Image: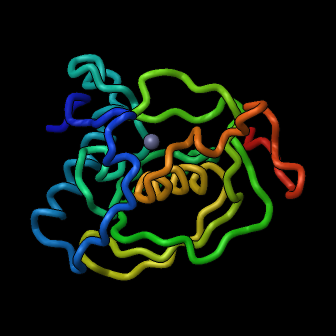
Amino acid sequence: MLTMKDIVREGNPILRTVTDEVPVPPSEEDKQILFNMMQFLKDSQDPELAERYQLRPGVGLSANQLGLNKRMFTAYFNDEKGRLHKYALVNPKIISHSVSMIYLPQGEGCLSVDRSVPGFVPRYERIKVKAYDENGKMLEIKLKDYASIVIQHEIDHLNGMMFYDRINKENPFKLPDDVPIRSLY
Ligand SMILES: [Zn+2]
């Protein structure tokens, strides 16, 4: 099983790499990696397993967070309405997005960042993503609100971007003034 020792931390250049596309349909090896990544997220959200294996709870994990130069990620979480979202996406691409933005009032965190970084991270309120699933089936997924935030955080990873790159440098709690933006909660 994957544990925190498998997760690379900030400072590692793979987190600043624009990752390579994954051949579709994914190889058996890539499917297994996605399966393990999904399992890590589930385990990390199980209080007993998290305690036993010292896992930080996570809702998303990109392949480059495991040191792999591969354009794929998994996400597993409940949205603000309690609906379960479960994604294993290969070569994801945002094909359209809203003008309006949102942010988490508590800011964002990351399994690769062992410190809290205060500040608002502006995200598109709604996105449409084209991707392939683990079997190579093409998908078009519409996401909004919390789900939109999580998926943008993961796609950023695949482009070598960290959440704090999007925080205002002068004032971390300053929001863009040229677009409509609201707090998710
Ligand atoms: Zn992250």
Closest to the observer, 68 or 16: 16
**Picture residue at 35% right of the left edge, 51% below the top:** 62
**Picture residue at 21% right of the left edge, 22% below the top:** 53
**Picture residue at 22% right of the left edge, 79% below the top:** 25
- State left or right for residue 96 relative to residue 9: right
- State left or right for residue 167 relative to residue 2: right
Closest to the observer, 164 or 149: 164
Quadrant hosting residue 147: bottom right
Image position, residue 141 (x, y; %): 52, 72
Relative to residue 95, is residue 62 depicted above or below?
above
Figure coloring = rainbow
Image position, residue 65 (x, y; %): 32, 44
Q: Number of marks in the image?
A: 0
**Picture residue at 58% right of the left edge, 38% below the top:** 164
Image position, residue 160 (x, y; %): 43, 53
- State left or right for residue 64 relative to residue 166: left
Quadrant hosting residue 165: top right
Image position, residue 51 (x, y; %): 28, 17
Image quarter in which the N terminus is found = top left
Quarter of the rendered structure image containing ligand 1: top left
Image quarter in which the C terminus is found = top right
Relative to residue 53, is residue 120 depicted above or below?
below
